Amino acid sequence: MSNRNNNQINVPEAKEAMNRFKMECANEVGVNLKQGYNGDLSSREAGSVGGQMVKKMIESYENSMK
């Protein structure tokens, strides 16, 4: 079994959009993200940003089905 990471974003425009989305979600949950490396974040802070991103993606998908 290979350990390849397939989580690469290959389209530059998509990468920029995801970064903007991540910053927007971080702002909504009160986490201060900076451009580049954010290794000083706690697991709780990073998880809250990821959780907010997933929540908004699910809401967007559900709204598109109506």
Image: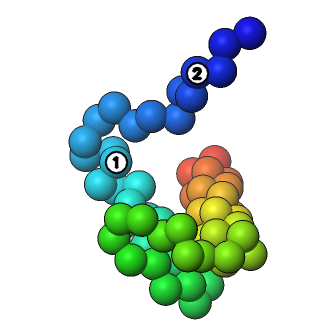
Determine which of the numbered discs, if any, sits on residue 29 in the image. Answer: none
What whole-number distance in Å separates the C-alpha atoms at marks 1 and 2?
Answer: 19 Å
Residue at 53 percent across and 35 percent down: it is 7
Instruction: Please state the horizontal and vertical placement of residue 1, each as a whole percent of the image.
Output: 74, 9
Which sits in the foreground, 47 or 56? 47
- The residue labelled by disc 2 is 4
Residue occupying the point 38% across, 60% down:
19
Q: Is mark 1 on a helix, strand or loop?
A: helix
Asked if residue 19 is positioned above or below residue 26 in the image, the reply reads: above
Label 2: element kind: loop
Q: Which mark is residue 15?
A: 1
| Disc 1 crowd, CA 10 A, few/some/many (<14, 14-19, 20+) | few
Examine the rendered structure and indicate whether residue 38 appears above or below residue 58.
below
In terms of image quadrants, where is residue 53?
bottom right
Whole-percent x, y for residue 27 in the image:
49, 84
Is residue 56 in view from this perspective? no
Query: Toward the viewer: 33 or 24?
Result: 33
Give the residue drawn at x 59%, y 76%.
41
2, 22: nearer the viewer: 2
